[in-house]
Amino acid sequence: MEKKQEILKILAARIREIVSRMSVDFNELNEIRLRVNEPFIVLIGGKEYFVSDMGKLVGQAEEGYVVKPRDIKETLEYISSYSLYAYEDEIRQGFITVQGGHRVGLAGKVILEQGKVKSVRNISFINIRMSHEKKGCGEELIPYIYEDRDICHTLIISPPGGGKTTLLRDIVRLISDGDDKHIGLNVGVVDERSEIGAAYMGVPQNDVGIRTDVLDCCPKALGMLMMIRSMSPAVIAVDEIGKREDVDALAYVMNCGCKMIATVHGNSIEDIRNKPVLRKLIEEKLFTRFIVLAGDGKPGRVDKVFDERGTVLYQGEA
């Protein structure tokens, strides 16, 4: 199914009509934002536009179509196949993944139970984030991830929006499939926020390789231990480590002889060193490869690749 059709089928009739009139490349569409009683907004190629009731991209809020409560209600019905209750687990995490791997973020009144999120009611805000694969973006980095045919423990460092998840996904695919120089390996992906594999009904919508197993919507620390115990991976991949339990589980996985590929928010190795929870990753040299993304508005652009001694192995283009 084309990306445009995947999105149109989950939108309220009026919004669907407006979007179908938009003269845009859906491969460049990043987000669709619906806020009750506020103008309809899309993000295309990283730039924000308001959308008129005729599907025209405009620059003034007052020219945009005002999203009605019924647009939100109807869109939620299509997203959940008329059964929000069936998606309670996903809603507790703030999003639902739909066919095609697109992620629908939801916000409204949060219901708490014993200090934990039980559900989200009166949903009035929807953010549809388009799933975009960039196959091949990790190919030039594969030689630096391997050393003497063995995978190196690798940490991808990137500011938010730098393209770390997209890069991680492609590296997972390449390691899983293998090539003429490297045999394919079993990879376990712990996909806490459903962004790497973007599973829909348990099936990854993104290509994560032929030897990859995915734990979807599972907390990273728990998922890493589950993978070790159940799936015998040679490599485990996780996105956005940050909690102490993540670091502890990661160290356990490494001690079991399994290789780690992980991402973390940051601008540099020094930035990671200055964060108390993550300092251990640098000081104890748990990782032997560091891929630092530029974060200059060009998602996925690599600035440098370092080894654990701080030696620059690769310098990206300016």
Image: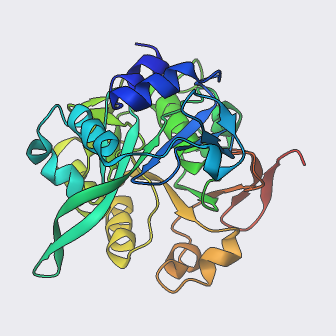
* Residue at left offset 50%, top offset 20%: 20
290 or 159: which is nearer to us? 159
Q: Is residue 89 left or right of residue 268?
A: left
300 or 100: which is nearer to us? 100
* Residue at left offset 80%, top offset 58%: 312
Which x, y percent locates residue 245? Answer: 32, 74
Q: Residue furthest right?
A: 318
Q: Quadrant of residue 24?
A: top right
In this rendering, the answer to whether 221 lies above or below 10 is below
The answer to whether one can see residue 183 in this image is no
Q: Number of callouts in the render? A: 0
Which x, y percent locates residue 157? Answer: 62, 60
| Quadrant showing the N terminus | top left
168 or 95: which is nearer to us? 95
In this rendering, the answer to whether 276 lies above or below 185 is below
32 or 39: which is nearer to us? 39
Q: Residue furthest front?
A: 62
Which x, y percent locates residue 218? Answer: 24, 54
Q: Quadrant of residue 49?
A: top right
* Residue at left offset 32%, top offset 53%: 192
The answer to whether one can see residue 17 in this image is yes
Q: Is residue 274 left or right of residue 197?
A: right
* Residue at left offset 63%, top offset 59%: 158
